[in-house]
Amino acid sequence: MYLLDTDTLTHLYTGNANVVNRLKSLRDTEVGITIITKAEVLRGRIDYLIKADDGEKLLKAQELFLRTEARLNELLIIPINRASSLEFSRLQDVSKFRKIGRADLLIASIVLTHQAVLVTRNLRHFQQIPGIKLENWVDR
């Protein structure tokens, strides 16, 4: 299973040729995102909607939110389960991981418990976590 980090998902949605081609070459492989990635993407769209400062921007922000929500609903979304919540607690207890953001630790805990590959440009950030499998599809 491949789980796309927020940065890679964004590149997919903007049509990055490397990401699109790599995805097409995977035939019959599960590809999805974590619930955390979904929340990060929607939070960005919600912020844009709430902060729109005129009617035209408000309508555009609403359209983007609804389009993004529909696209996300087409994806496999991997939720936090009991095992990943325990893994998250374990990762939080490791002092050298404290500089990794909470959302990234949550993503890592889901990836680890599902024995998935995290597809991200942020390799250096996640490489400190033992056992995590990483790929970068953007920069090839």
Image: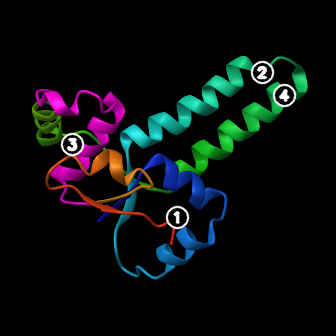
The mark nearer the N terminus, 1 or 4, is 4
Cβ atoms under marks 2 and 1 closer than 8 Å: no
Q: Which residue is mark 3?
A: 109
Residue 115 is one of the magenta-drawn residues = yes
Q: Quadrant of the N terminus?
A: bottom left
Q: Which residue is mark 1?
A: 138
Task: Label 1, secondary structure: give it.
Answer: loop
Query: Measuring 55% from the left and 35% from the top, which residue is drawn there?
Result: 42
The mark nearer the N terminus, 2 or 4, is 2
Task: Label 4, secondary structure: give it.
Answer: helix
Looking at the image, is 50 positioned above or below residue 88? above
Query: Measuring 26% from the left and 52% from the top, which residue is drawn there?
Result: 127
Identify the mark at residue 57; answer none if there is no mark: 4
Looking at the image, is 62 positioned above or below residue 32? above
Indicate the position of residue 96 as horizontal and vertical percent values.
18, 32
The mark nearer the N terminus, 4 or 3, is 4
The mark nearer the N terminus, 3 or 1, is 3
Quarter-wise, where is residue 79 in the image?
top left
Q: Is residue 114 visible?
A: yes
Looking at the image, is 86 positioned above or below residue 125? above
**Identity of the amino acid at label 2?**
Ala
Identify the mark at residue 52; answer none if there is no mark: 2
Rate crowding at label 1 as few (under 14), some (14 to 19) or many (20 or more) other CA atoms within 10 Å. some
Which residues lie in the magenta part?
92-116
Q: Nearer the viewer, mark 2 or mark 1?
A: 1
**Identity of the amino acid at label 1?**
Val
